[in-house]
Amino acid sequence: MEREYAFLLTRKQGSVMNSDILREFTESVRTTCERHEGVFRKLELIDTTTMQQNAVSYDVTKRILDALQEITMERIGYFKAQDVTWPQARDRLGYTEFYKSQLQMQFGTREVVERDISFVQPIPIVVFTTRARDRILVFKKKLRSLSKGSPESSRLIIYAGGHIREEDSLKGKDEPLLSIARQAISREANEELGIAYYPSEGNPLCIWVRNHPTSVKHMAICFLCEVDVEHFTFSLNENEFIQRTGTSQSGQFISLAEVSSQAEALDSWSILILGALFDLKVAYKQLPLELPFE
């Protein structure tokens, strides 16, 4: 009421702006919040009794902007590297060999998780091949879609996929990694290729290359999908991938022999996948392992 009277020449209370109505309104707000706060992502009460109008406007605006930033910032999944049991000399394992039930997924903002070398981010990916397994769908990512120093930069890759997001976990904190990974790759396949895909494999290939500052923070969970090329239609996300134009191989099914002949253009995950899933021995120089979190 003091704010209401601040610039008026009268002290007479109005039919709506008066002490009784304000008291009832305040009580109604409290009651409504207590009754329905569980259905909102975030609910805050601000007591403006002793605040000036400009201070109220600033506080409310700042809280709204902070909430919007929190909502729009991508939250991705990770493990603490110290909790991961992985043989020192191996870069590939089956999911059932790697995953232990006590290894629980955590989520944080992408900016924070990507910066911390003590976190390992599981990355579900999928390889599309013909039913005869004689050709593979290859991609090349646009530089602007990659983080600085990414091993995929300027490389030919044989998979699509991406980070696990918090919304991929549908059953709470006790949901197994495989269930979350399946949901994540289903979403990624739709976003990147415009297709409906959901893997059924129970033991996908896991890859953890620890010879690069970026690679050591990412672990691939690789699914394999055999398709009938004649009836397999997809559309490359133009923000992520170089399109199928001119002589570009991105978005094309090419033979194993042709893939093998371009070994120097492949990234390490692609080379390891070729050996593990296609028995294609491509020269791969394994650099000394460097584990900064040990």
Image (cartoon, rainbow, N blue to C red):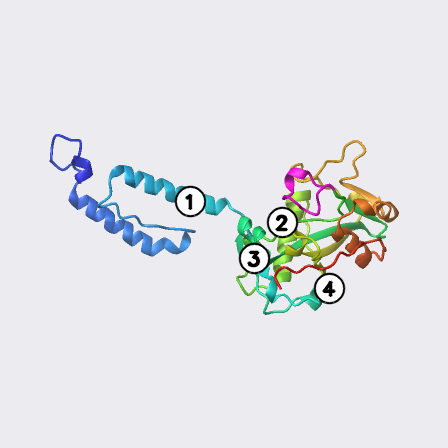
Query: Given this view, does label 3 or label 4 mark the residue nearer the observer?
Result: 4
Mark 4 vs mark 2, CA separation in Å: 24 Å
Which residue is at a point 60% across and 56% down the rendered structure image? Answer: 117
- Where residue 91 appears, x then y in whole percent? 74, 61
Q: Please name the residue that numbered disc 2 is placed on.
A: 187
Query: Given this view, does label 4 or label 2 mark the residue nearer the observer?
Result: 4
Query: Depth check: 123 or 22 in front?
Result: 123
Whether residue 157 is in magenta: the answer is no
Which residue is at a point 19% across and 44% down the rendered structure image? Answer: 21
Q: Point out the stretch of residues depicted in magenta.
A: 140-154
What is the secondary structure assignment of the residue under circle 3? loop
Horizontally, residue 199 falls left or right of residue 278, namely left
Q: Earlier in the sequence, mark 2 or mark 3?
A: 3
Q: Earlier in the sequence, mark 1 or mark 4?
A: 1
Which residue is at a point 77% across and 51% down the rendered structure image? Answer: 270
What is the secondary structure assignment of the residue under circle 2? helix
Do the residues under discs 1 and 4 have CB atoms within 8 angstroms? no
Q: Amino acid at mark 1?
A: Asp
Location of residue 192 (image quadrant): top right
Which residue is at a point 65% across and 66% down the rendered structure image? Answer: 99
Mark 3 vs mark 4, CA separation in Å: 23 Å
Q: Earlier in the sequence, mark 4 or mark 2?
A: 4
Q: Please name the residue that numbered disc 3 is placed on.
A: 169
Query: Depth check: 103 or 44 in front?
Result: 103
Location of residue 84 (image quadrant): bottom right
Q: Please name the residue that numbered disc 1 is placed on.
A: 66
Q: Earlier in the sequence, mark 3 or mark 4?
A: 4
Mark 1 vs mark 4, CA separation in Å: 41 Å
Q: Please name the residue that numbered disc 4 is placed on.
A: 93
Q: Is residue 54 above or below residue 202?
A: above
Mark 2 vs mark 3, CA separation in Å: 12 Å
